[in-house]
Image (spheres, rainbow, N blue to C red):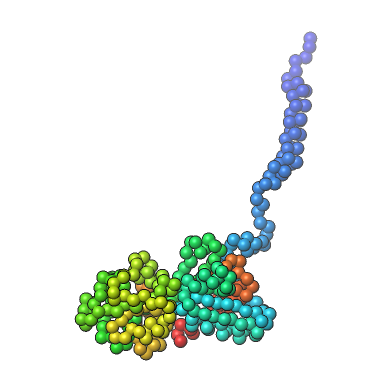
Amino acid sequence: MSQIQSGPPPIVYILLLALLGFGGYWFFVRTPENQSDQPSLPSEGVSARNDPSTPLTPSQFTVPGSLPSGTRLNLQGSTAMVSINSALKQGFEEQFSGVVVTTSATGSGDGISAVLSGNADLGASSRPLRSEEQAQGLVAVPIAEDAIALVVGVNNPFGQGLSQQDAVDIFTGQITNWSEIGGPDKPIRVLNRPPVSGTHQTFREVVLNGSNFGNTPNITTLERDATTPMLRALGNDGIGYATAAQIFNQSTVRPVAIDGLTPMAAQYPYRRNLYYVYKDPANETVQAFLGYAFSDAGQAAIARAAQD
């Protein structure tokens, strides 16, 4: 009588072993080859700066131990940042003997264009970058905050403040006489900065809520972005605007309160950031200057400039 088998025939075990062996070969030998097109993870300690499309952040700018004598940095742009640029230039040149920083102020737009064309290392800007400027590799680093002051001549008989809506109406040409806001019966002479001015651009966004300046006969747009000549031209019937730090120590003009607040108040409505603009990746001198600007010494220089 023949014996009955209780398990699968031997051939089944042979096939299972063959399948297991083939699977192991595929996993350990073939799979890495197929995965070679996949992006590898960065190794430990690799900085994001290895990707040139990742701009440096303020905390990554450092002050080097030294810079070669004869190193030069060209800084152009915003008239609102003249005092800040001058203070940082002085401190940077004192820290690095033989280094020369040249500055000029013809407006934020000019400074940004100079960086794009390679004619400046840094641009000083009182407005943020536009998307098309960022697309060309520019990076804006906020360096300080200030306020835009509406300003009149010290002998202007208008002694009240303005509401935010009053400011809009004056600079869009809806209010053209001082009597409409409680002053004498006399036309308001509005002095507007040129479009190249970053303060002009920011004023449109922050004060006029994106509206255009008016084109009424009482509004004059200046040809050159220069604060001092504008302040001198205000007389006793004009109104203009400037970065607040530029008018605090002026004896011939005074700021106009907005909703009862002066530019010194923390809740003053017309506040903005000031920026340095560079072409990414930043060169060694730009990184050193920005490192100094963000250092304790640089921040102290900026604070002093705001009080001068």
Q: Name the side, left or right, on which 217 lies relative to 306.
A: left
Locate residue 117: give its quadrant: bottom right
Q: How many marks?
A: 0
Residue 167: tell me if it is visible: no
Q: Is residue 21 shown above or below 39? A: above
Q: Name the side, left or right, on which 225 lies relative to 259.
A: right
Pick the residue in front: 58 or 248.
248
Tell me which residue sits at (56%, 85%) in the image: 90
Percent coordinates x, y for residue 120 in the rendering: 57, 74
Locate residue 5: give its quadrant: top right
Tell me which residue sits at (57%, 81%) in the image: 102
Farthest-out residue, bottom: 251
Locate residue 213: give its quadrant: bottom left
Q: Is residue 269 shown above or below 23? A: below
Percent coordinates x, y for residue 130 in the rendering: 47, 64
Tell me which residue sits at (79%, 9%) in the image: 1
Q: Name the side, left or right, on which 131 lies relative to 25.
A: left
Percent coordinates x, y for residue 205 in the rendering: 38, 67
Percent coordinates x, y for residue 178 in the rendering: 24, 79
Pick the residue in front: 10 or 261.
261
Residue 210: tell me if it is visible: yes
Pick the residue in front: 75 or 26.
75
Pick the residue in front: 3 or 226.
226
Farthest-out residue, right: 1
Tell me which residue sits at (55%, 70%) in the image: 115
Q: Is residue 105 shown above or below 32? A: below
